[in-house]
Every structure is written in C-alpha cells, then in structure tokens.
Image (cartoon, rainbow, N blue to C red):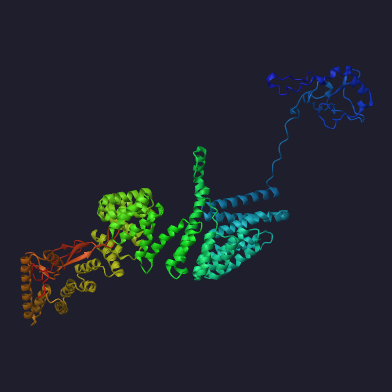
Amino acid sequence: MENVHLAVEEDDIYSGYNDYNPTFDNEELDKDAGFQEAVRTSHGRRPPMTAKFPGTAAGGRPLPSSLGTRMALTSSIGRPVTGVVLDGATRPMSAVRAAGFTSSRARGSSFDPLGQSRGPAPALEEKREDLPEEKIKLLEKKVNDLITESCMAQSTGNSQLALEKAKEAERKERLLVRQREQSGTAEQLNIDLTYAVLLNLANQYENNEMYPEALSSYQLIVKNKMFPNAGRLKVNMANIWVKQKNYAKAIKLYRMALDHISDEYKEMRIKIMQNIGTVFVLLGQYSDAVASFEHIMSKSPNVRTGYNLVLCYYATRDADGMKNAFHKLLAVPLHVHHEDKYITANDDVISDMLMEAIKNDKLHQMERDLKARAEKYVMTAAKLIAPAIESSFAAGFDWCVEMVKSSQYVELANDLEINKAITYLRQKDFNQAEAVAILKTFEKKDSRVKSAASTNLSALFFLEKDYEQAERYADLAMIADRYNPGALVNKGNVEFVKRDYAKAAEFFKEALRNDSSCTEALRNLGLTYKKLNRLEDALDCFLKLHAILRDSAEVMYQLADTYELLEDPHQAVEWLMQVISVVPNDPKALAKLGDLHDLEGDKSQALHYYCESFRLFPCNMEVIEWLAAYYVQTQLYEKAIHYFDRAILVQPSEVRWQLMVASCYRRSGNYQKALDTYKQIHHKFPENVECLRFLVRLSQDMGLQEVQDYASKLKKVEKMKELREQRVKSTREGSARGRREGSAGSADSGRSSSNGNKGERLGAQVMSLPASGDPYESSSPKELDASYADPLGPLTERPKTGAKVRPDDDDFADDDLGDELLPE
C-alpha cells in the first residue's frame, strides 16, 4: 500500500470506479455450492465466454482458489484470464476495480494511469523543406494562391494586376512541371492545376483586350488531349472573333463547340444557337438567322429570341413571318406569378409580416424585371411591325392590339392604342383629328389609362397653343391620377403661359416630389425661377439637372446664362466652354462667348469667337454688325465692306447697310467708288435724304455738273418731309409708327458737337441670343437696341456689343437724319 497515493476528495478523478454490485462480491464464493461444483467439474475449466473481450467484468474478475487465496483461473488451454500479470505489466481492471490499480504487490508497478513515469514524449520530427516533395507541395500552393489573387484583382476591376498575377502563376506552373520531371514523379503531374492556370491566363488576356494572346492560350488548352471537355472553350474563342468582327470564323467555332457538347446540356446548346443567330444578323444574313431562331423557339422558346425573330422577319419584309413571330413572342411563358399573391385577404398579422418581407425581395425584383423586359419587347415589336403587316398603319395596329388582348399581356392593349394615337402624329400624313379621337376614347377607361390619355391630349393642345383645352385635360389627368408628374408639368406649363409664375413653380415642385427624376419639371422650374428673378434657386435647379443630364448642351447653356445674370462672367465663360466641347459647331454659343469676352474687354478673344460664329452661320446680323463695327474701328474698311455686303444679302431692303458700304469707300479715299455706290442707292431708294446729301457733297467736292440736280431733289424731299410731319400732327395718326420709323431709319452723316465735327450714324435692331430660353418657345426673339457710327471723333459706345466709335468731320449736320420720307 506504500505505492498507493490517496487523492483529495475533490480531486479524485477516479471516484465511482470501486462502486459495484454486491452480487459480484467474491468473498462469499467459497460458500456458494453451485460455484464450487462448477469449479471442480470440467465446466469450470472451459475458457470463459468473455475471455476474447479483455477488460470486461466477467473475464477480469480474479477467482479464489480452494485455499481461499485469490488467484487467476486459467482456461483449459492454459490462456491467462483477464487481470493476470504479464511481464510485470498490470492489465487494467474494469467494472470492479479502478483501471490500473490493484492491491496486490505482486502486480508490480505503481499506480500511474497517465504514464508519467515514462517521461516526456519524443519531439516531433521537423519537416525538411529542402526535400523535393516538400518543394513541389509549396510550389503548388503558391500557384493556387496566385490564381486566387488574379481572380480577386479582376473582380475589383484591376485587370492589369490580374494579368500580371496570371502570368506569374503560369511561370510558377512551368517550374513545377520541370521539378516533377527532375524528381521522377512526372506521372503525378496535376492536370487540373495546369488547366486552371492556362484558362485564367486566357481570360485575363481577353479582359485586357489582348486578343491574339488570348486565342493562343485557348488554343493550347483545346489542342491538349489530356484536358477533357476542352472543346467547350471554342465558345470563348468565337466570342473573341466576334469582338474582332471576324464573323465567319466566329460562326465556324460556334458550330465546332456545338459538336463537342452533347444533347444533355440543352441550355448551353440553346445559348450557342442564340450566338450563331446573332452573328448571322451582324452579317446581314437574315434568312440564316431566322433558321437559328426558329430552331430555338421550337426547342426552348424565350422572349429575347422571339423578339429577335420578329426583327429578322421585319428585315426581310415578310409580313406573314412577322405575324407568326409576334404570335410566338406573345405565347412565350414567363413563369411569373401574379401580383395578387402578395396581397393578404385576412387580417392575420403573421401573414402580413410575411408578405411585407417577400414583397420586395430579390426573387420578386427579378420577376418584375423579367416582366418589364418582356413587356418592352412586345411593345417595341408591335410598334415596329404595325405599319408593315397590313395595307395601312391603322389596320396593322388594330391587328396587334387584338393579338395582345388575347394574350397574357392584355394590360398592354390600352398602352398600345395610346401609342397608335401618338404614332398618328409622327406619320408624314399627319392626322391630328384621328389621334385626338383615339385619345378621347380613353376618358371612360380606368384611372391609369385615362390619366395617360389626358396627359397626351393636354400636351397636344398645348403645342397647338390651345391653352384652354390643354388646361382642361391637364386637370382631368390630375383628377384621374393626382401623382402623375406629366399632368402636373402640363398644368404648370399652362400657368407659366398665363404669367402666373408662382403657381407654375408650385406645380413643378409637386411633380418633382412625386418623381424626383422628372427632368422636364426640374428644367421648367429653373426657368420659372429665372422669371421670378430667383436666380440662386434657378442655379440650384440647373446644377441638379446637370448632374442627371451630364452631356446636355442646353443645360450647360442655361447655367452660363444664369451666371451671367448673376454678374459672374468668368463662370459663364467656363460653362460656355463646356457647351462648345459638347457641340463645337454651335454658332450661337460661339457668338455668346464672343459677347462675354467683349464685355470683359478682351477684343482679340471676342474677334476669334465672332469669326468662328460667322463662319458657321453667316446670317446672324448681330455677329455681322459687331465684326463690321470692329473693322471700322480699326480702320480696316475693306474688311468692313465684306461684312456690310453680307448684311445687304441678308436684309436687301435695309438701306443702312448700303449707306455704310458707301461710307467705307469714302473713308478709304475711293471717292469715285463711293459716288457710284451712292448713285446706286439713290436709284433704289430715291427718297432717302442721307443718300442725297452725300451725293450733293461729293458732287461739289469733285466738281460734277449733277450737283444742282441732286440739290433740287434734296430740297424736294425735305419739303415732302415737312408736309408729312404736318399731316401727322394734324391727323394724330401713326405717331407710334413714326417713332419706330425714326429709330429704324439709317443715316450716314450727323452733326457733331459745337466744334463743328460731323459724322455718320447708323441705327440697327439686332436679335439677341435666346439666353434664358422660354420653356415652350425657345425661338422667341428679343430685340435689343444697338447703334453704330463711323470711327473718327468723340467716342460713343454700342449698348450691345460694346464697340466704340466716333463721328466723322466731313458729314452734313442734320437733326432729322434718321427719319424716312413718305413717297410723293
């Protein structure tokens, strides 16, 4: 017992092992007659039934001998029973005694259930990385890691890094193959790893648009017989040939890939057939494309293929084919459940929560997208084939409407009829009455269709300037659907025309609250704010609109005009430069840039942009006047004459341009040419006072005999002028007309200040650019007053263009220089 160490009660990990049933107490076995009889007979010398299962209760129990001592019984064949000592090692007892413990000293070793007496376990053998097999394993892991990094880089959009990783993986894989060969384990070559490396490399070449290298990599895989099913990669090769527009090779490879794919893979074969049909369309071989699409529609119909089939028949002008294809398109099952399944009929809270959870889940979104795409295909196909399948466009639309009504797209029938009315308006044989009649038939339909039809009618009447009817149908559309942004925009437009800008702004803002992406409402709201002189709000609207319509030159122009009104010419110039970058050949934008630079005093830039505007559109009188004034100011009269001649071509009935040509000849010293020009003007306009005065002066200076004739004509014209003034004063008629004629009359001479200087003066009306741009009539002109005079005297400034000129000292002085005379 000295080797027995009793554990503390709470630390006794073997508690319970000595608990046994009293039935198994061997102390009373010597008094058991049955047991003693069994021991003495041959039955007791048989091997125990559980001897071959060591550790059990029956085989492990020591039996007492006839002497009363405990000794292990032996079987008839001398096999020791459980619990005997073999070579000094104790066999663990079970059930009765604790494992590894015995009270007999003959059992040998002390109690050591954990084997602590044997000492620590030997250290693990360290891996030797210099071994060939270890090197190969590490290299394989490195190749796999590089493939993973390449794929991850491609998923983040870094194609260049993905290609570099793929190339490095390919180099490592080649090194791995060489090491396998050198170590004599070539038969253990990882074919799957080689396939993954080459396929990833080919994909990365394709993603980086390195098509020859990608084709070479794919070819290595396809030609290697060790790679099973490599023939499917011919589809990838065919896709590359399509990108390179080599359609013949693409079709060949698609068909080869089709041969390598068994009939079990139906979906893949259908997709390859779709690609073949699409390539035939790109080649213009519509009959071959029809064959491919017809095969698909017979095996596995889908909406996209049906739509393509309609397009191919339309390209071949086959009316019966278009009808059959449209019928097949309508018959394609969508496998989309009805929206009613998301509506609960009872008041069950759990059901309501479930419906709310799945109402907008991924599956429902996918169903909505599929249905929307199918409806778009059906509507587009119907609008396309309607004018081509029947003798008239209306009959074709009626046939399409009837087909749609009898299909699963019955909801599209009303939309199709509305499109029929809109198409009426777009046809060359404009039939407005028919379109209005069709739209009016929807006034008694359901609210959605009624609102759409009323919105279109409102827009139609608004374009005809029938604002009363436009407002009526806008109100009907709003009653049918209060949240219809189109109806609200139409209502706001009517209020804008009525000049009730505050109310118009409210309707535009309500349209934006219902649909924040309504660009029409946002644009019109910005224009309304400009009318209300709320320029900061208008600028905010146009900036938001620019964020939606990035490339809209109109929005950029509105921003430039708003900044100009805010007296920020630098920002205005910046936005106009963006307009020029989008539409480089817009003459009005170039002219506006020239005007802004002129106001800033940069004459050279102003000249450049005005010249560019004149080159693109040589009929803009504002540009012509500015260029002519610039060259007169710089005393380049020959160039000024060129622009005045252009003004004469644009406005041949305006005498002031011809007077300016004669004035330029006179200032350049060519008096004979000036005299001839004045004579031509007098022949066309015999009652022009300015022309007669210059003829008198030039005739006197040149000593001509016609001076008396011109002087008498001048007196006669002046007398008629006085009579006209008296007649106007007496009758008080035409006073307003007289003022307009006086301001529009042209002159080539005028009185200077008290020092006796004399000059020519020309009044002109020029049209400004549509700076603000009315939201409904962008072409409505605004007239600004501008003046022009010859340079050689005290400076006077042109109000619009800023060109500074001064009067001449050789002209007659007359206070009534700009008036026009009535005929005799």
Question: Percent from the top left, x then y, of residue 151?
Answer: 57, 52
Outermost front residue:
444
Question: Percent from the top left, x then y, of residue 197?
Answer: 62, 55
Q: Is residue 559 visible?
A: no
Is residue 376 placed above or below 70 in the rendered structure? Answer: below
In the shown orientation, is residue 471 left or right of residue 197? left
Q: Quadrant of residue 584?
A: bottom left
Outermost right residue:
41
In the shown orientation, is residue 452 left or right of residue 198? left
- Residue drawn at x 72%, y 20% as measured from the top left: 7
Is residue 612 placed above or below 61 in the rendered structure? Answer: below
Q: Quadrant of residue 204?
A: bottom right
Question: Percent from the top left, x then y, of residue 81?
Answer: 86, 28
In the shown orientation, is residue 675 left or right of residue 350? left
Is residue 37 placed above or below 236 in the rendered structure? Answer: above
Question: Percent from the top left, x then y, of residue 761?
Answer: 14, 68
Q: Is residue 16 visible?
A: yes
